[in-house]
Image (spheres, grey):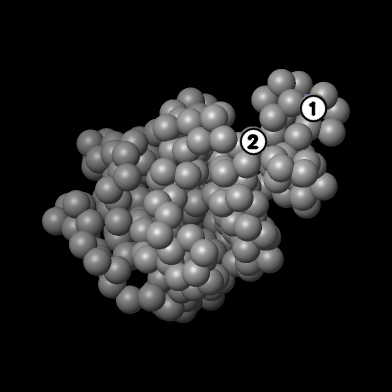
Amino acid sequence: MRGSRRTVALTGAGVSVPSGIPDFRTPESGLWANVDPMEVAHIDVFERDPARFWSYYRPRFHSLRDKRPNAAHEALVELERRRLLDGVITQNIDRLHRSAGSQNVVEVHGSIATSSCRSCEVKFTLEEVDALFDGDGVAICAACGGAVKPDVVLFGEILPEEAMRQAHELAAGAELMLCVGSSLVVHPVAGLPEVTLASGGKLAIVTKGATPYDGDAVLKLEGEVDEELAQLIATLGQP
Ligand code: ZN
């Protein structure tokens, strides 16, 4: 990191696990234990059966609303502050990189920070959405009565073009990509390390478990992400 002129972080669900947000791939307990998020958090369900979609997504909003950034998010803020990090590309929708204070964040799967009316495009904050639900449990636009959808990329939707363009640009320009808390298997984000490698950049991976890029990385750390990144800051020393 000291030698790299341009470093970018790529983060996945693992970076938010210490904040109490489980990776959705790990089995859940309780009400939704037997429901596949890939089935219900799907654009087709949102369009066909919005009450079912929101019966899953509204509690999800509630559970994410009060979550706080952890030491891993904070370490990335500190690296950016020291000009050792040029940006964060994240698959996470929990907005924790922004609430921690990271400035240059590309949220390739969108964010729960806002929801938008699909008819008049008015935006509602996470706090405002809760007042929009009708008797069926469906969020209805306060301005026009249209359907309100979270500004996150649902299953079955394509990724936002502009965010992917920015992510690709950061990856292509990086001398070092720091991959944190991602198994690097969900495409198209999983293709970004390849972009960095193809441009002559290096990879460092901080993730539990194997990734397809382990053999290409100059460094692989398998500990808890918050502890590993806190150790990185300590090792770099005072600015
Ligand atoms: Zn509207």
SS under mark 2? strand
Is residue 153 visible to the viewer in this orientation of the structure?
A: yes
SS under mark 1? loop
Q: Amino acid at mark 2?
A: Lys
- Compared to residue 172, the image places residue 219 above or below, namely below
Residue drawn at x 29%, y 68% as measured from the top left: 208
Q: Quadrant of the C terminus?
A: bottom right
Closest to the observer: 75 or 236? 75
Q: In the displayed structure, does residue 129 sit left or right of residue 155?
A: right
Q: Which residue is mark 1?
A: 145
Q: In the displayed structure, does residue 29 sit left or right of residue 65?
A: left
The residue at label 1 has a CB less than 8 Å from ligand 1? yes
- Compared to residue 61, the image places residue 191 above or below, namely above
Outermost residue, left side: 215
x and y, in percent, of residue 91 in the image:
45, 48
Closest to the observer: 48 or 90? 48
Q: Which residue is mark 2?
A: 149
